[in-house]
Amino acid sequence: MPKCNRRCAAEAKITLAYGPHHYCAEHFTDFFEHRVTKTVRKFKLLKRGEKVGIGVSGGKDSLALAYLLGKYYAKSNELLALMIDEGIEGYRDVALRVAKKYCDEWKIPYQVVKLKDRFGYSTTEVVHKINAQPSLGTSCAFCGSFRRTVMNEWAREQGCDKFATGHNLDDEAQSVLMNVFSNNLPKMAWLGPMTGAEGFDGNGLFVKRVKPLYECPEKEIIAFDAFKGIEHYSEECCPFSWMAKRNHVREMLNHFEDQFPGTKFTVVKWLQDLKPHLEDVKPAGRLQACTACGSPSNSPLCRPCSMVKLLDAVKAAPRKAVAAKGGPTCAETKGLHDREFV
């Protein structure tokens, strides 16, 4: 068993293959927390006095994020958590109980917003509609668009200067490759540790989203939670996640990371090197307020409102069981259930 790199004589509890680095639990959590605060400073994600919204789901990423923001920034910034209820029974309701427990413990006020209340449909109801008319696409496309709209609307209503999400290194590397595969430069330009960081605020329609866990690999977040005793909701993969194309990209990236440690860091570093060359890349269309809901949009009707119209057009959707699994699930492609880190 290797010893901790910090020469504390303790046995290592985790090995980071891209170093390789070996850490005991205490020195790993110190290393992890330093990396997050360094990311915040390096990319200027937060300023003293700003009101910061936090997306908290009860999963590993959002709880690590809430814990660290509460520990390091609660004295200098006002923190407020948003919990989005997609309406997936037996999944989100359980996760939100975990989220509420920790926000209460860490004294972070929170609010819950239901997709059903905002759009007229829960994610489960969206899936029933898709079962009736598969040409609608995937539930992930609907849910993701709805969630992003709720985040921005809520942050604006609360007067937040920034909205922090639990997106990690794995998420960013996956998004980079997905945009490469779809040849989507406008979306590629939108990526980074701070959404809209290059002087773009959407005429005041957007609240900038920040990613303090931007340089943190997913497996290290799981280790951090375990060492800190944060009991996140472990079944955090959505039961409808098999529909997502991201799962295939995740599986591929994890394979490369296993064979060539540091691959995910390299992909994200490539994006950072590319970003200066994407400054002139703009989204298609002129940014305007949606005529139906007032959200920022590149067309008269924003994407979520257009999606709601599509759902409304599907009449008498049968409330039958979810369609049979058609691809790998989130959990199957993560391979993160093993708590042995060395």
Image (cartoon, rainbow, N blue to C red):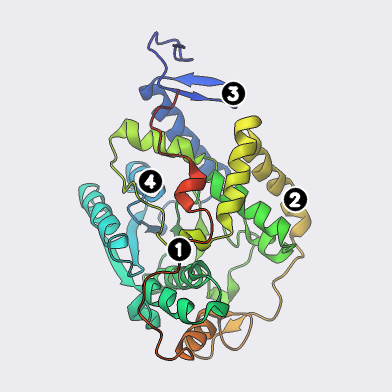
Q: Could you say which quadrant of the image residue 120 lies in? A: bottom left
State the CA–CA distance, disc 1 to disc 4. Answer: 24 Å
Which residue carries the number 4 mark? 60
Q: Residue at 75% of width from left, 59% of height from top?
A: 278
Q: Residues within 10 Å of mark 3 (few under 14, many from 20)?
A: few
Marks 4 & 3, CB-CB < 8 Å contact: no
Front tag of 2 and 1? 2
Which residue carries the number 1 mark? 161
Q: Amino acid at mark 1?
A: Asp
Answer with mark 4 or mark 3, whichever residue precedes in sequence: 3
Specify the quadrant that holds the C terminus.
top left
The image shows residue 28 at horizontal and vertical percentages of 42, 26
Q: Is residue 192 visible?
A: no
Q: Amino acid at mark 2?
A: Leu
Answer with mark 2 or mark 3, whichever residue precedes in sequence: 3
Marks 1 & 4, CB-CB < 8 Å contact: no
Relative to 216, 80 lies left or right: left
Which residue carries the number 2 mark? 274
Which residue carries the number 3 mark? 19
Placement of 15 over or under 117, stated as above or below: above
Front tag of 2 and 3? 3
